[in-house]
Image (cartoon, helix red, strand yellow):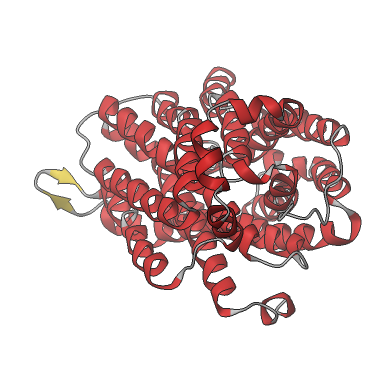
Amino acid sequence: MASPFRSLASHQRHAFAACFLGWSLDAFDFFILVFCVSAIAGDFHATTSAVTEALFLTLAFRPVGAFLFGWLADKYGRRPALMLNVACYSVFELACAFTTSLHELYWLRALFGIAMGGEWGVGAALAFETLPKEGRGFFSGLLQEGYAVGYLAAAAAYALLFPHFVHMSWHGYNFGWRGMFLVGAAPALLVLYIGLKVEESPVWRERQAAGAAREKAPKLSFGELVRYAPTFLFLVLLMTCFNAFSHGTQDLYPTFLQKDHHFSAALTGSIGIVYNIGALLGGVFFGGLSERFGRKRTIIVAALLSLPMIPLYALSHSLYTLAAGAFLMQFMVQGAWGVVPAYLSELSPGPVRATFPGLAYQLGNLITSRNSVLQARAAERFGGYGKVLAVTVLLVAGFLALVTAFGRESRGADLNA
């Protein structure tokens, strides 16, 4: 696993590290809310489904950020756009700690969604335009699993800090879940690292020198997207399936453990660590595998292998079987996801590479953005989350495999073309 890194130059390592950390810390800030849903509901005397509306708004507004920050990155460069993006989502995360009502939280999570939506496309463009073509599948898997690392860090922070925060107060506010959002402001420090260590994408610089960036960026809007409409629409459909697959298996799993099995915060966070280790390993494993067997085939296999994990993941009752099932489920879910950064970058046209894949990704998020709300309402109606999660995996994994089968293979595409 270390061999791909040995071939990287210093500027390539810094570029990859910045993009990986940007995505990890972005996910960290998103999943802090996931772990605090029950606590926020109790504090504001609201139902679980009412709090999950904040998750919906975050996902729904991500396409706005994908277009806005992608446009900035295509016009002004990947590096400054990424710095602005990280600063924005850190500020909005910090502001969430000071909300006085659920409606204020909704507004702030919508703004956070705009910032969160921009990071993936900008980071992926910077990374894959800087890294060598060889080993792209491995780096794709590792980059995407920055998401799992962020989720793991949120789980660890929740398990270690939240039990202490609930006994603290500040200016009349119970520290509790608010303390978690204060911790979530830490990613702002990444801006300094990017500014000091990261160089601009060489592919973007070459276009800028040739005058292509200035000519194409103002024309970006939707004109370039219409030109590549069939590919764009396929990617939107594909990312709809992918986002339903990940958010449908992850966002309410901590709530499932707390509501259906009455696990404590520490135990819920510990299981979160376990299944995110599985996600990290799965993404790297299947991402690397896609270099040998192709992007399409790898996605399909990983998606279908999630189906036998359903009984352990959602229908078992003991701590150890649930932890094992969650580990295996996320190994497969994020295994399929590990192929996505390389696959979308390879299918995207160069002049809009920061916008094209990121916008497709986040439009998929928009389409599935009410997933957690619908799951929560179904669980409230039918008296439990387990069966809801099981049905979600069954439907979404099958549909993802089917849609992927209609795509084209892209392994080894030349991103300089």
Q: Quadrant of residue 105?
A: top left
Whether residue 230 is situated above or below residue 281 in the rendered picture: above
Viewer-proximal residue among 66 and 99: 66
Q: Quadrant of the N terminus?
A: bottom right
Q: Quadrant of residue 229?
A: top right
Q: Residue furthest bottom?
A: 6
Q: Position of residue 54 (x, y in %)?
A: 40, 30
Relative placement, left or right, of 329 versus 299 is: left
Residue at 33% x, 28% y: name it: 106
Q: Quadrant of residue 361?
A: top right
Asked if residue 267 can be seen in this view, the reply is no
Q: Position of residue 298 (x, y in %)?
A: 84, 50
Residue at 37% x, 59% y: name it: 187
Residue at 39% x, 53% y: name it: 86
Q: Residue furthest front?
A: 210
Whether residue 290 is situated above or below residue 71 in the rendered picture: below
Residue at 54% x, 37% y: name it: 252
Asked if residue 158 can be seen in this view, the reply is yes
Relative placement, left or right, of 326 versus 23 is: right
Q: Residue furthest left?
A: 171
Number of labels in the image equals 0
Q: Position of residue 318 (x, y in %)?
A: 65, 50
Q: Position of residue 129 (x, y in %)?
A: 63, 59
Viewer-proximal residue among 10 and 342: 10
